[in-house]
Image (cartoon, rainbow, N blue to C red):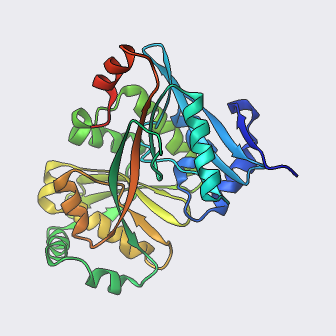
Amino acid sequence: MPQKLRILSNNAIDRDAWDACIASDKHALIYNYSWWLDHMAESWLGVVWNNYEAVLPVPHRKKWGLNMAYTPPFTQQLSIAGSTTPEIRTAMIEKLTQLFPLVIFQMNLPFPKAKMVKKRTNFILSLTRNYDEIFNQFERSCKKNINKAIRRGCVIDDQITLNQVFELYREAYGRKAGYTSEHYVRLQTVLQEAVSRKACHIARVAEKESGETVLGGLILDDGRRLYYLLGAPTQKGREMRATYFFLNQLIMQYAGQREVFDFEGSDIPNVAQFYQSFNPEKEFYYANYVNKFPFPLNKLLDMRLLPK
């Protein structure tokens, strides 16, 4: 059988075969599944090697009337999944950049011919050890903040809804995050789907005595990796060190049950410092920017769109 790289439109993709390819690759992320892309991307197509031996999702949309490939909101990165070689991966990336004159794409690989590639940092913690071993590796400051949270009465439960978590997140970070109402609607629908697939955990931290919610959190779960998608503390939650408590409780619960806890970032110095207090490992992904429009449109787009 000849080797073949195919471009499949959205309605031509065999979603069962696609998702089976994602599930077979232990390094593939939850964002590559068809059900996530169906809800979060305005549209998407697939670059497929042979009979779904390897796949690359390509979300796309129009911005200012121009066709572009992009990374959907709340989607840290995408990847090539399945059985590949360096040559196949290069061919798939080249095919992506041939399809669209404008590409702003976060991926686990750099694009060889990108106009700009920005290396970004993610933090992950192995859960294959027992909890005591993991906890002992936390920085002293992290342990102190966890103990403060316990003394101040933090408890965790699931008595919170998706909408309540969203409201807490908007109050805490909404203006800084830059997400639109449409983004939250998309996120709500995909998380409802994820809950039905047992791929999302909704939880809160409350003050024990009053029952007041001091943090709402959303965790994605693909059976191998937990993803810290959203964590939104109130001002009181910050004072109670609720985020330290929340993450520690998740790590305690899933140690030995999952492979990785994914902190989902970050290059923001104070956020990175917070995550590093849990003594995670670094992994990297890449913000790739390709602009093949002619002058002067390319220059105008560069000024607006080049990754910061």
Side of 154 where 264 appears, left or right: right
In-front residue for pair 256/197: 256
In-front residue for pair 210/279: 279
Residue 165 location in percent, x, y? 34, 45
In-front residue for pair 303/170: 303
In-front residue for pair 226/216: 226
Residue 118 location in percent, x, y? 33, 45
Residue at the (17%, 62%) spot, across then down = 241
Query: Which quarter of the figure is the C terminus placed in?
Result: top left
* Most distant residue in the right direction: 1
Residue at the (68%, 52%) spot, across then down = 54
Marker count (numbered): 0
Side of 116 where 50 appears, left or right: right
Side of 255 where 27 appears, left or right: right
Residue 115 location in percent, x, y? 39, 35
The image quadrant that residue 238 belongs to is: bottom left
Residue 153 location in percent, x, y? 19, 67
Residue 155 seen in this snapshot: no
